[in-house]
Image (tube, helix red, strand yellow):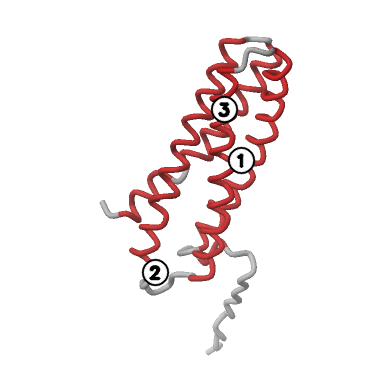
Amino acid sequence: MNDAHLHLALNHAPLFTLIFGFCLLMYSLRQKSDQVHRIALYTFIIAAIMSIATYITGGRAEEVVNHLQGINLEAIEDHEGNAKIANIITILTGLSSIAWFFVKNKKIKTNLSLGLICLSLLGVAYMARTANIGGLIRHSELDSHIITINKPEKIEKN
Protein backbone atom coordinates (compact mmCIF):
# COMPACT_ATOMS: atom_id res chain seq x y z
CA MET A 1 0.00 0.00 0.00
CA ASN A 2 1.50 3.33 -1.03
CA ASP A 3 0.82 6.77 0.45
CA ALA A 4 -1.93 7.52 -2.08
CA HIS A 5 -3.77 4.33 -1.05
CA LEU A 6 -3.38 5.20 2.62
CA HIS A 7 -4.73 8.71 2.03
CA LEU A 8 -7.72 7.35 0.12
CA ALA A 9 -8.39 4.83 2.89
CA LEU A 10 -8.31 7.52 5.60
CA ASN A 11 -9.92 10.48 3.89
CA HIS A 12 -13.56 9.62 4.63
CA ALA A 13 -13.00 9.11 8.36
CA PRO A 14 -12.81 12.75 9.53
CA LEU A 15 -15.91 13.78 7.58
CA PHE A 16 -18.12 10.95 8.78
CA THR A 17 -16.75 11.11 12.32
CA LEU A 18 -17.63 14.82 12.45
CA ILE A 19 -21.13 14.13 11.14
CA PHE A 20 -21.61 11.36 13.70
CA GLY A 21 -20.28 13.59 16.50
CA PHE A 22 -22.59 16.42 15.47
CA CYS A 23 -25.60 14.09 15.51
CA LEU A 24 -24.61 12.77 18.93
CA LEU A 25 -24.11 16.29 20.26
CA MET A 26 -27.52 17.42 19.04
CA TYR A 27 -29.14 14.29 20.49
CA SER A 28 -27.39 14.82 23.82
CA LEU A 29 -28.60 18.41 24.05
CA ARG A 30 -32.15 17.44 23.15
CA GLN A 31 -32.22 14.53 25.63
CA LYS A 32 -30.12 16.37 28.23
CA SER A 33 -27.81 13.36 28.42
CA ASP A 34 -24.39 14.10 29.86
CA GLN A 35 -23.17 10.61 28.92
CA VAL A 36 -24.06 11.00 25.22
CA HIS A 37 -22.63 14.53 25.32
CA ARG A 38 -19.29 13.15 26.49
CA ILE A 39 -19.35 10.49 23.76
CA ALA A 40 -19.95 13.25 21.19
CA LEU A 41 -16.92 15.13 22.50
CA TYR A 42 -14.75 12.01 22.35
CA THR A 43 -15.97 11.55 18.78
CA PHE A 44 -14.77 15.08 17.92
CA ILE A 45 -11.38 14.31 19.44
CA ILE A 46 -11.13 11.18 17.28
CA ALA A 47 -12.16 13.25 14.24
CA ALA A 48 -9.31 15.68 14.96
CA ILE A 49 -6.78 12.85 15.19
CA MET A 50 -8.08 11.31 11.96
CA SER A 51 -7.98 14.72 10.28
CA ILE A 52 -4.31 15.16 11.17
CA ALA A 53 -3.47 11.69 9.84
CA THR A 54 -5.41 12.34 6.64
CA TYR A 55 -3.74 15.72 6.14
CA ILE A 56 -0.26 14.25 6.62
CA THR A 57 -0.90 11.44 4.15
CA GLY A 58 -2.30 13.96 1.65
CA GLY A 59 1.08 15.59 1.11
CA ARG A 60 2.67 12.22 0.57
CA ALA A 61 -0.14 11.14 -1.77
CA GLU A 62 0.49 14.25 -3.87
CA GLU A 63 4.08 13.12 -4.43
CA VAL A 64 2.82 9.74 -5.67
CA VAL A 65 0.22 11.03 -8.16
CA ASN A 66 1.64 14.41 -9.23
CA HIS A 67 3.36 13.01 -12.31
CA LEU A 68 0.60 10.61 -13.44
CA GLN A 69 -1.33 11.21 -16.62
CA GLY A 70 -4.91 12.44 -16.18
CA ILE A 71 -4.23 14.18 -12.88
CA ASN A 72 -5.82 17.60 -12.41
CA LEU A 73 -2.98 19.62 -10.87
CA GLU A 74 -5.26 22.61 -10.24
CA ALA A 75 -7.62 20.37 -8.26
CA ILE A 76 -4.65 19.15 -6.18
CA GLU A 77 -3.83 22.74 -5.18
CA ASP A 78 -7.48 23.57 -4.42
CA HIS A 79 -7.83 20.31 -2.47
CA GLU A 80 -4.72 21.06 -0.44
CA GLY A 81 -5.86 24.60 0.41
CA ASN A 82 -9.31 23.47 1.50
CA ALA A 83 -7.82 20.52 3.41
CA LYS A 84 -5.67 22.91 5.44
CA ILE A 85 -8.74 24.92 6.50
CA ALA A 86 -10.81 21.78 7.18
CA ASN A 87 -7.96 20.35 9.24
CA ILE A 88 -7.63 23.52 11.33
CA ILE A 89 -11.38 23.64 12.00
CA THR A 90 -11.47 19.96 12.96
CA ILE A 91 -8.46 20.34 15.26
CA LEU A 92 -10.16 23.35 16.92
CA THR A 93 -13.27 21.20 17.36
CA GLY A 94 -11.17 18.49 19.02
CA LEU A 95 -9.30 20.96 21.24
CA SER A 96 -12.56 22.64 22.27
CA SER A 97 -13.90 19.21 23.18
CA ILE A 98 -10.85 18.55 25.35
CA ALA A 99 -11.26 21.96 27.00
CA TRP A 100 -14.88 21.10 27.86
CA PHE A 101 -13.67 18.28 30.12
CA PHE A 102 -11.45 20.64 32.14
CA VAL A 103 -13.88 23.54 32.54
CA LYS A 104 -15.83 23.58 35.80
CA ASN A 105 -18.09 26.57 35.10
CA LYS A 106 -21.48 25.40 33.76
CA LYS A 107 -22.05 28.57 31.69
CA ILE A 108 -18.67 28.21 29.97
CA LYS A 109 -19.41 24.53 29.28
CA THR A 110 -22.73 25.53 27.72
CA ASN A 111 -21.02 28.15 25.56
CA LEU A 112 -18.38 25.62 24.52
CA SER A 113 -21.12 23.18 23.53
CA LEU A 114 -22.84 25.85 21.43
CA GLY A 115 -19.50 26.71 19.85
CA LEU A 116 -18.96 23.03 19.09
CA ILE A 117 -22.23 22.92 17.18
CA CYS A 118 -20.96 25.75 14.96
CA LEU A 119 -17.42 24.39 14.64
CA SER A 120 -18.56 20.87 13.80
CA LEU A 121 -21.01 22.11 11.15
CA LEU A 122 -18.32 24.33 9.65
CA GLY A 123 -15.93 21.38 9.77
CA VAL A 124 -18.43 19.13 8.00
CA ALA A 125 -18.93 21.76 5.29
CA TYR A 126 -15.19 22.19 4.69
CA MET A 127 -14.50 18.46 4.86
CA ALA A 128 -17.27 17.77 2.34
CA ARG A 129 -15.95 20.48 0.01
CA THR A 130 -12.42 19.15 0.38
CA ALA A 131 -13.59 15.61 -0.40
CA ASN A 132 -15.47 16.82 -3.47
CA ILE A 133 -12.42 18.66 -4.80
CA GLY A 134 -10.29 15.61 -3.99
CA GLY A 135 -12.51 13.54 -6.25
CA LEU A 136 -11.81 15.94 -9.10
CA ILE A 137 -8.08 15.19 -8.97
CA ARG A 138 -8.55 12.00 -10.94
CA HIS A 139 -12.26 11.80 -11.70
CA SER A 140 -13.05 14.39 -14.36
CA GLU A 141 -16.56 12.95 -14.72
CA LEU A 142 -17.38 14.55 -11.34
CA ASP A 143 -16.59 18.05 -12.60
CA SER A 144 -19.91 19.70 -13.46
CA HIS A 145 -18.05 22.33 -15.49
CA ILE A 146 -16.94 19.79 -18.07
CA ILE A 147 -19.56 19.20 -20.71
CA THR A 148 -19.02 16.48 -23.23
CA ILE A 149 -21.28 15.96 -26.16
CA ASN A 150 -21.32 12.64 -27.90
CA LYS A 151 -22.58 13.09 -31.41
CA PRO A 152 -24.42 10.07 -32.73
CA GLU A 153 -22.89 8.50 -35.76
CA LYS A 154 -24.68 9.08 -39.01
CA ILE A 155 -26.60 5.99 -39.99
CA GLU A 156 -26.76 5.31 -43.68
CA LYS A 157 -29.85 3.68 -45.07
CA ASN A 158 -29.39 0.96 -47.66
Q: Earlier in the sequence, mark 3 or mark 1?
A: 3
Classify mark 3: residues with Cα within 10 Å, few (<14), some (14-19) or many (20+).
many
Q: Which residue is mark 3?
A: 21
| Residue in view at x 59 percent, y 50 percent | 85
Q: Compared to 78, does 91 lie above or below? A: above
Which of disc 1 and disc 2 is earlier in sequence? Answer: 2
Q: Could you say which is closer to the camera, residue 100 or residue 141?
A: 100
Q: Secondary structure at mark 1?
A: helix
Q: What amino acid does circle 3 point to?
A: Gly
What whole-number distance in Å separates the C-alpha atoms at marks 3 and 1? 10 Å
Q: Position of residue 47 (x, y in %)?
A: 49, 34
SS assignment at label 3: helix
**Percent of width and height locating residue 133:** 55, 58
First in sequence: mark 3 vs mark 2: 3
Quadrant of the image occupied by residue 82: bottom right
Label 3 to label 2: alpha-carbon separation: 34 Å
Quickly name the residue at label 1: 124
Q: Is residue 96 left or right of residue 47?
A: right
134 up-or-down from 70: above or below: above
Q: Which residue bears the numbered disc 2? A: 66
Q: Residue at x 57, y 47 (%)?
A: 86
Looking at the rendering, which quadrant does residue 106 occupy? top right
